Amino acid sequence: MKDRSTEPKPDVIAGRNPVSEALRSGRPIDKILVARGEKSGAVVGILAKARDRQIPVKEVDRTKLDFLSGIAPHQGIIALAAAKDYCTLDDILAYAEEQNEPPFLVILDELEDPHNLGAIIRTAECTGVHGVIVPKRRSASLSYTVGKASAGAIEYMRVARVTNIAKTIDELKARGVWVYGADMNGTDYLDCDLSGACAIVIGNEGKGISRLVREKCDVIVSLPMKGHINSLNASVAAGVLMYHALKGRS
């Protein structure tokens, strides 16, 4: 039996030539990890191509590259491939218009767990969400794990990756979309009408939504807590709010 711990993960592209070819072919890539202090000519050229495509680059210890690449030689650089192409905010809004429906979006503010992202995408597809928005940095990306957790829904859901969530909220509000942030000490979600053009903001698993993003929201909505725990898993909270919105839109 193979030792799976020594095999590269399905979304990992390891080595200078494989990464360079992936960039050249236009394959969707979430980010590039480069060994700290790696300055060779080939790597510099690869990173220049990554910057041209606005792909995030992060310096990491070689031990992390060793772990991700398994037995594959990484030569100091790894690319994490996306399971699907990202779209733009305009693509999402255009799709809603094609369906003759008010826009229905989910915005994820630095959600980091790929299983949560996959679960949210799955529920979003089931509830008629037109698209999901994630930030380029400090966020789970469309990895193999996300695709698996979504149970295939990733193939049908439009996901846009933006540079700045707060600015994206401003743009949505300017285009007539009401933005509802899920956080504590807000309006009971049952008292909120999500039937029109709306975006639901779900925050980081531990920190919730950031202060600036909270300030940008039109309404803060909360789920009642009757037990000893004062918060829900991010994907569960998102699911409750998406189905509440669906009820109003039906």
Image: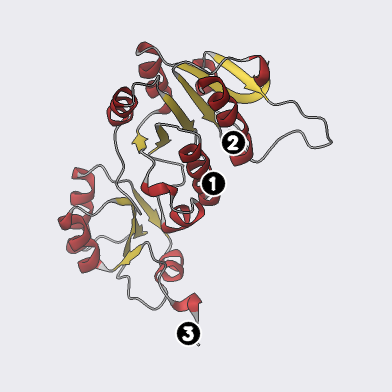
* Nearest to viewer (mark 3 / mark 2): 2
Query: Quadrant of the rendered structure where residue 177 is?
Result: top left
Instruction: Please state which amino acid type lies under the numbered disc 1.
Output: Ala
State the image coordinates of residue 5 (x, y, percent, origin top left). Answer: 50, 75
Could you say whether the residue bearing mark 2 is in a helix, strand or loop? helix
Between the residue at mark 3 and the residue at mark 2, the CA separation in whole angstroms equals: 38 Å
For disc 3, the marked residue is 2
The three-letter code of the residue at mark 3 reads Lys
First in sequence, mark 1 or 2: give its number: 1
Query: Can residue 205 be seen at all in this image of the molecule?
Result: no
- Mark 1 in CB contact with mark 2 (< 8 angstroms): yes
**How busy is the neighbourhood of tag 1: few (under 14 within 10 Å), some, or many (20 plus)?**
many
Mark 1 residue element: helix
Sequence-wise, the earlier of marks 3 and 1 is: 3
Question: Which residue has dot 1 on it?
Answer: 119
Identify which residue, 238 or 66, lies in the foreground: 238
Instruction: Evaluate whether residue 18 shows in this view.
Output: yes
Farthest front residue in view: 250
**42 with respect to 100 (left or right):** left
Q: Is residue 60 above or below residue 220?
A: below
Q: Vertical placement of 175 versus 245: above or below?
A: above
**Residue at screen point 52% across, 13% down:** 218
Mark 2 sits on what residue? 239
Tell me which residue sits at (84%, 36%) in the image: 228
